Image (tube, rainbow, N blue to C red):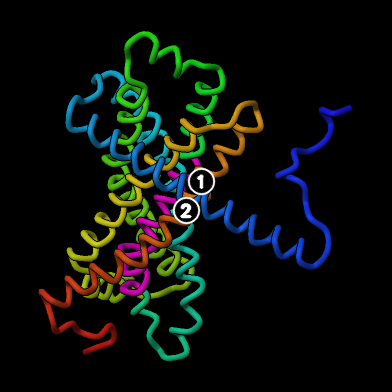
Amino acid sequence: MAGTHEPLGAARRRGLFGSIYDSIADLGALVQRTIETLGDMALFNWRTFLWLVTRLPQRTTLFNNMYQIGVLSLPVVALTGTFIGMVLAVQSFTQFRDFGLETQLGGVINKSMFRELGPVLAATMLAGRVGSAMAAELGTMRVTEQIDALSSMGANPIQYLVVPRFLSCLLLIPSLTIMAVFMGAVGGEMYCVFVLDIDMYHYTANAKKFVENWDLFYGVVKSVFFGATIGLVSCYRGFHCEPGAEGVGQAATAAFVQSFVIIIVLDLFLSILLDEIYLAIWPLTPGLFAG
């Protein structure tokens, strides 16, 4: 049957030169799709920010999203943060004990949680639990034409569906980050003091000595960018979901993977930027093991 044959342009060529040609064509198609996706995402983000400054969402809608995104994420973030702090204590204790510096673990664990592990951990949990769910929910609405129905009734889908979710991620991830940092510090201290038998007074003194207010600010600033990334990427993937159940699953997976990759890249550049700002304000910094 004629309908079973591939289009002429889609036919794969044979031979060495045909394989090279097909590889170049596939690479070009990938670059084209990437540029189209970046442009489409930029327009999507622009519309979201435009509605954000033009008209805020309804209070009930915003509070409901805040509850789903922030409050229900607290237990898993707190539990994960606690065990991450304990794992840091286990992994670091042997090396520090060889140098007789067990009491310095408080500074190392807390510094790591405040600056790096707290914000990244909270963002990863949010991307996995909330980002995938948002993409799946919006993708289902796209597949079942609920988003089109909203547009036909005169409501703007971005203002009604995206802005509340974006704001909830943006506003509540700092609280989740602080919870992860706090529970990580508590978990690390409890394990060091009650399991590893490290002196509590010296552990606490070193923890206070080497952690500054800047470290908390450092992590919270990172988390704001991470939350914005999760909200925008997840909503974009949900809005541009492919038809069918498979498309919804792919949108949920892509939302998490892309959010996580962007978070890691942002983490690097934000760390460089914040370190440069810190050194510009406070050029002389004490060493971790300085007397």
Percent position of residue 115, x then y: 31, 65
Question: Where does label 2 land, which residue?
Answer: 260
Task: Describe the element under mark 2 as helix, strand or loop.
Answer: helix
Question: Where does label 1 land, which residue?
Answer: 256
Identify which residue is drawn at 25% across, 37% down: 49
Specify start and end residues of the magenta stretch as a single range. 106-130
Q: Tag 1: residue type? A: Phe
In the shown orientation, is residue 91 left or right of residue 70? Answer: right
**Against 72, is 223 above or below?**
below
Question: Which residue is situated farthest in the front direction here?
Answer: 8
Identify which residue is drawn at 37% across, 52% down: 180
Magenta stretch prevailing secondary structure: helix
**Against 248, is 185 above or below?**
below
In the shown orientation, is residue 271 left or right of residue 19? Answer: left
Q: Nearer the viewer, residue 156 or 173?
A: 156
Q: Nearer the viewer, residue 148 or 187?
A: 148
